[in-house]
Amino acid sequence: MLKLAVLPGAICGGCDVALASLGERLADLLRYYEIVYWPTVVDRKLTDFLKLSSIDVLVHMGGISTEEEAKLAREVSSRARVKVSLGSCSVYGGIPGLNSLYKPIEVYEAIASQVDVRSKNSDLELPRPIEYSAYTDIVEPDVLAPGCPPGSIVLDQLFDLLLKYAETGRLEPRILLLGDPESLCNKCPRNPKTTKITMPGIRRIFEVKLDDNKCFLEQGVLCMGPATRAICDHSCIKANYPCTGCGGPIEWGVDSGLSHMSSVASALMVDREKSVLEAGLARELDKIRDVTGIFYRYTLRKSLTYKLRKLRVGE
Amino acid sequence: MSWKPKIVAFFCKWCAGAAAETAGVMRLRYDPSVTPVIVPCTGRVTPSMILSAFLNGADGVLIGGCHTPNDCHYVAGNFKAFKRVQLVKKLLEEIGVEPERLRLEWISATEAPKLVRVVNEFTEEIRKLGPLGGKRA
């Protein structure tokens, strides 16, 4: 029996649910794997788990926000043969990665002003918050499975890969980014099949009556599909909600936020550029509030923008 | 040693780039802090090229292209550049970098004196803003 562990860092629980949604396929995995740790699913104490000297597959979910999470992630990863980084927080920093624009103490104080963070029991010491990072910032995983939560393509591939590893004991290639290496738009049910998409302007989602068959960009709604890796079965888009870019960049290492910005620039009012001129374009672009939050919702921690911020504040 | 600004300038080869050539032919002088990079069209300048310039030591980025609405050799590349620059400026502001460090100007092939004026003005502005990096000085 191979040993499979699922270790949560700073998580919301979505990745747990996504992994559990493998459903009956989990039973197939149990033919080869023993789940030695997965707090949401099996009853195993952390202290017992830490007594194991080696594990075969570690699935790490969530980013790293406290000293304790960092220590655990490092320690357990060093004992694992195959390390899987599951979910956009783990791979790219995810939504909490947006707090990289602030100092850890500022984030802590903002939270402390809204909820009670003191320990009621004087014996207990709360873990110290550190600067938030992705799991991939502190450990080099073998498999990257992005998504918030990981979409069906990623989960299917992860399942196949775990089975294959159990059967052959091999994992190829070494570092593997799951999902299909193409833009989400490629197989989008709303793909307008033209070479030129024109955004009529910038509209908020509540400002338009959304047509459920028409490309979001062509309705003026910002959709991150063009620069997002195909990791899902377009579940948001099928529910008439534009892609927010949780799959991350199409290729590992590309700055997806900047690609998103570039794609918007290529599509916005291309038919009327010469009549509305710079002033008209600027007026539309000014409707985009919170550029970082929209274009870098999941990937700020891994971006050039994050590095520039660090350079600016002198760290 | 006193700090000197470093500026990366992306000039399109048809307009601003040609103006830089003309400036040379006319023996006009402009501030040596500028490193021109000639690109086929300002529409080729991606946001990641701009950020990479900043990350690799530039204190300011200048982009020079053809006049709107009808001078672009590729019909509307200059409008794409305008939209990208607008978005990047907003991004820079949000992360605490002065958006003035990025400037877009339309300079035609015949406007060598304008190119010289813009380059000198921009250098002066960056000099006033100081170095981009907190520790770099």
Image (cartoon, rainbow, N blue to C red):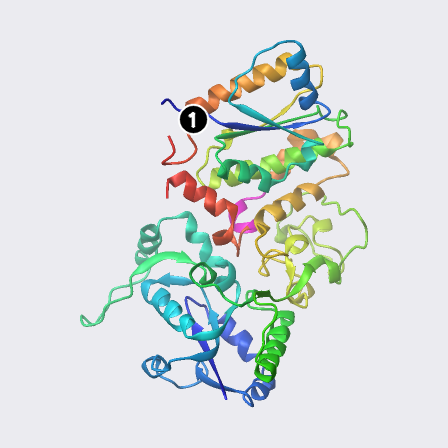
Q: Determine whether, in the image, residue B124 is placed left or right of residue A284.
A: left
Residue on which the image places disc 1: B129
Task: Decide which of A260, B28 is in the foreground and name it.
Answer: B28
Q: Position of residue A139 (x, y in %)?
A: 44, 63
Task: Decide which of A114, A11 is in the foreground and name it.
Answer: A11
Q: Position of residue A144 (x, y in %)?
A: 55, 66
**Magenta span includes A291:** yes
At 62% across and 56% down in the image, what residue appears? A251
Task: Decide which of B120, B96 is in the foreground and name it.
Answer: B120
> Within the image, what quadrant is residue B77 found in?
top right
Extreme-right residue of the structure: A194
Q: Quadrant of the C terminus of chain B?
A: top left
- What's the amino acid at mark 1? Leu
Which chain's residue wears label 1? B
Q: Is residue A213 visible?
A: yes
Q: Determine whether, in the image, residue B116 is placed left or right of residue B130.
A: right
> Within the image, what quadrant is residue A215 found in?
bottom right
Question: Mark 1: which secondary structure?
Answer: helix
**Magenta span includes B126:** no
Q: Position of residue A150 (x, y in %)?
A: 57, 68
Residues drawn in magenta: A287-295
Task: Decide which of B95, B60 is in the foreground and name it.
Answer: B60
Q: Indicate whether A77 appears above or below B74.
A: below
Q: Quadrant of the N terminus of chain B?
A: top left
At 64% across and 75% down in the image, what residue appears? A156
Q: Indicate whether B52 appears above or below B33.
A: below
Q: Is residue A290 visible?
A: no
Decide: few, some or many residues near mark 1? Use Cα within 10 Å; few <14, some 14-19, many ≥20: some
Q: Determine whether, in the image, residue A108 is placed left or right of residue A150.
A: left
Q: Indicate whether A314 appears above or below A223.
A: above
